[in-house]
Each structure stands twice: as C-alpha cells, then as structure tokens.
Image: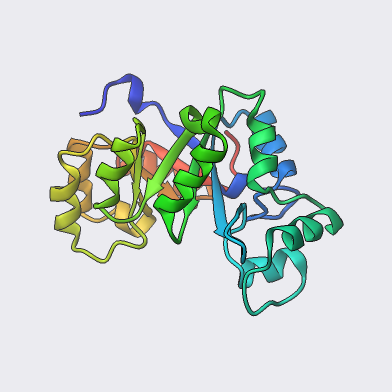
Amino acid sequence: MTSNAENKIQMIAHAGGGYDGHNYSNSIEALNGSYQGGFRYIEMDFSWTSDQQLVCLHDWDKTFKKIFKKKIKQAVSYAEFKQLVEEHPDFRSCTLDSLAQWLSNKPDVRIITDIKYDNLQGIRLIIEKYPELKSQLIPQFYQPEEYPILKDMGFKDLIWILYQYKGSKQSVIELSRPMELFAVSMRTSQAKNKTLQKLLKHHRIFVYTINDENSKIKLLENYGVTGLYTDFLAH
C-alpha cells in the first residue's frame, strides 16, 4: 500500500508541458514554463534518430510534421534534427544533450521517460551517457517483463503505463501486485474501469492527458486518481 505521504496529488507536465498554446513540443521553453509554474515531475517523449541517438520528440510522423512543418518518410539523423531545432522560429525541442544540460542545476526535477520503441535500450543509453541523471529519472515501462530488468538497473521509482499492454485488465491486477511502483498510468476510461480500480489496493493510479478542470476534479474525487499528466492545467 502507498503511504499517506505518497498519496499527495502529483501534477505532471506532459511532453514538457504546454508552451504558448503548443503541446507535444518537448522543448526547452516548455520546460522553463513548467518549472516556473511549479512542476517538478515532467514527462518527456523520446524518439530514435536514424543514427541511434535520442531526441525529445513524440513521433516522426504527425508530431514531427506539426512541429517542423514538413513531412518525412523516416527518422532524420541527430545532426539534421539539431539543425531543424536551431532553425525553428518559436521553440527549441530538446535533444538528450540539451535536456541533460537543462537538468544540471535542477536536482529537484524528476523526468518521467516515454520511450515508445526499444525502451530498455533507451534507458541504458541515457544513464551510460549521463549517469548523473539516473536519480532524476522515473522510467515508464510498457510490458511487465521490463520491470525486473529496470529494477536490476537500480531504479527505485518506476511507472507501468498501460497503452501498449495487450493483456487483460485482470492480468494487470495480478502482475502488478508484487511490483513496487511509483504508479500505474492509464487513460481516463481505464481509470474508471471497475477491474482496474482494484489497483488502488496496492498502487497509485495516474491518468493522461487531462486539460479540463472538471475532468480533473471528477478523477480525483470519484476514482481515487492521485496523479495527472497535463499540458495546460496549472500545478
């Protein structure tokens, strides 16, 4: 069971947080705004470049087109991504390097990672390249078999996020029971499900992505949710 201290409501800036009406920017400007707004838990998206580096981007399809106003058939190189970031008129999407630099004087910030493909490889890359960041990371994992590997890597705080998991709701209850988790993250509809509500006996439920105050209140008051990912709600 979670302790009373752990039951404090956690507001998480989604994809770095909203910036100037933009969501999914994963940008330095979004990070600055979130930090100034009181957020200390910040979720960041990571995607692989063509030369196997990590950059802060949700995907190379719709989100890339939305941010950079061009369509591509496949991931670009790290150098190409950096050039596009430098040329962007409004904000600077993070690379792993610029994110690490931003975090270097903010030990109070925790980054929740969202690496949709080759997640374990991505986590290893981050802590090999920037071992000083390890204590600031809360890795999300997608399949239960990732959990023991991340624990063996030394991570204390982990989040099981359910959007890639294809197993039954009951299997989530059973598989998560022995896990020591920071939270289980899910969609609003899942948080309201009677079976998944049983998670509350052992774990916290976090919900993504909530930008409406009424939805926030209902989830917190009616469904025992204690963490929300948001683009635009205040901390």
Q: Position of residue 126 (x, y in %)?
A: 52, 42
Query: Could you tell me which quadrant the N terminus lies in?
Result: top left
Residue at the location (29% across, 53% down)? 192
Q: Can residue 205 be seen by looking at this rendering? A: no
Q: Position of residue 56 (x, y in %)?
A: 62, 52
Is 207 on the left-hand or right-hand side of 231? Answer: left
Q: Can residue 44 be seen by looking at this rendering? A: yes
Residue at the location (69% across, 29% down)? 36
The chosen color scheme is rainbow
Residue at the location (75% across, 74% down)? 70
Quick one: 192 or 28, which is closer to the camera?
Answer: 28
Quick one: 162 or 131, which is closer to the camera?
Answer: 131
Q: Quadrant of residue 10?
A: top left
Is 15 on the left-hand or right-hand side of 118? Answer: right
The mark total stands at: 0
> Which residue appears farthest toward the bottom when viewing the image?
73
Compared to residue 70, the image places residue 123 above or below, namely above
Q: Quadrant of residue 218?
A: top left
Residue at the location (34% across, 25% down)? 6
Query: Could you tell me which quadrant the C terminus lies in?
Result: top right
Compared to residue 182, the image places residue 49 above or below, namely below
Q: Position of residue 164 (x, y in %)?
A: 35, 63
Compared to residue 233, the image places residue 70 above or below, namely below
Is 130 on the left-hand or right-hand side of 93? Answer: left
Q: Position of residue 190 (x, y in %)?
A: 30, 57
